[in-house]
């Protein structure tokens, strides 16, 4: 291993230790996890977790994991104003990274949070973790959902309609009337 590789490795370890220290004081308590049809990550799971530091609730994080389980999508990290700028949000992201070991992607990043996401990306990259660019437009979200649409179960009403028209097509192809008694 070259000297440059050794220095890079030491730098990564140092960044990881700093992020671990931030995350150590942060606890995520699940308030809700659900997978309703129509949500962005469906049939994946959406989570809402309370954020606690030293036993006090300081905010919440709303995130989802797609059914491929290859991305964590951050809908919102909300830290009470008095507790902002203490690394809590970064600690939350690091906990999610350590738990899932997949890229983290913000959704609809607010302009006021640009500085936070810029710093977080830089620190995560230095530690060898991945924070991807935000998904902002409807087109971005649709393209992302296209990766797991083959896993979305068909709704009952849509299945019944599809089966009916398949039956009609089969009857027509066989030369039989579409419904009994109709000629």
Image (spheres, grey):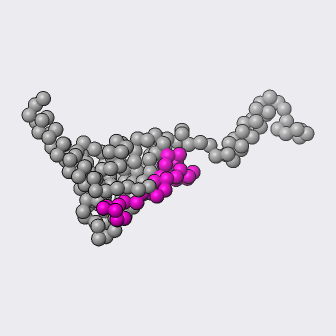
In the rendered image, residue 123 lying in the magenta stretch gets the answer no
Left or right: 32 as drawn, with respect to 92: right
Q: Residue at x 40, y 44 (%)?
A: 71
Residue, far bottom: 82
In the rendered image, residue 42 lying in the magenta stretch gets the answer yes
Nearer to me, 2 or 15: 15
Residue 156 position in % (x across, y down): 67, 45
Q: Is residue 79 above or below residue 141?
A: below
Point out the image quarter for the C terminus.
top right
Q: Residue at x 53, y 45 (%)?
A: 43
Q: Residue at x 72, y 36 (%)?
A: 166
Residue 176 position in % (x across, y down): 84, 32
Which stretch appears magenta? 31-57
Residue, far front: 55
Left or right: 121 as drawn, with respect to 150: left
Left or right: 84 as drawn, with respect to 3: right
Nearer to me, 41 or 56: 56
Q: Is residue 126 above or below residue 169?
A: below
Hey, which quadrant is residue 87 in on the image?
Answer: bottom left
Q: How many marks?
A: 0
Point out the image quarter for the N terminus.
top left
Nearer to me, 131 or 92: 92
Residue, far left: 3
Asked whether the viewer can see residue 74, the reply is: yes
Residue 150 position in % (x across, y down): 54, 38
Asked whether the viewer can see residue 90, the reply is: no
Residue 79 position in % (x across, y down): 34, 64
Nearer to me, 15 or 108: 15
């Amino acid at each position: 291993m070259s000297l440059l590789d050794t220095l890079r490795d030491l730098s990564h370890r140092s960044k990881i230790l700093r992020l671990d220290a931030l995350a150590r004081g942060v606890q995520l308590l699940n308030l809700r996890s659900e997978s309703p049809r129509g949500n962005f990550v469906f049939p994946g799971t959406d989570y809402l977790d309370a954020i606690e530091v030293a036993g006090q609730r300081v905010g919440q994080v709303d995130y989802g994991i797609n059914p491929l389980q290859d991305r964590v999508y951050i809908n919102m990290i909300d830290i009470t104003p008095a507790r902002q700028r203490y690394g809590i949000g970064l600690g939350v992201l690091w906990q999610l990274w350590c738990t899932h070991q997949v890229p983290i992607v913000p959704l609809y990043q607010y302009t006021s949070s640009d500085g936070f996401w810029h710093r977080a990306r830089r620190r995560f990259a230095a530690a060898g973790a991945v924070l991807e660019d935000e998904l902002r437009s409807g087109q971005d979200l649709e393209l992302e959902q296209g990766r797991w649409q083959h896993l979305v179960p068909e709704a009952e009403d849509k299945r019944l309609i599809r089966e009916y028209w398949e039956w009609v097509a089969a009857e027509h192809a066989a030369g039989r009337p579409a419904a009994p008694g109709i000629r």
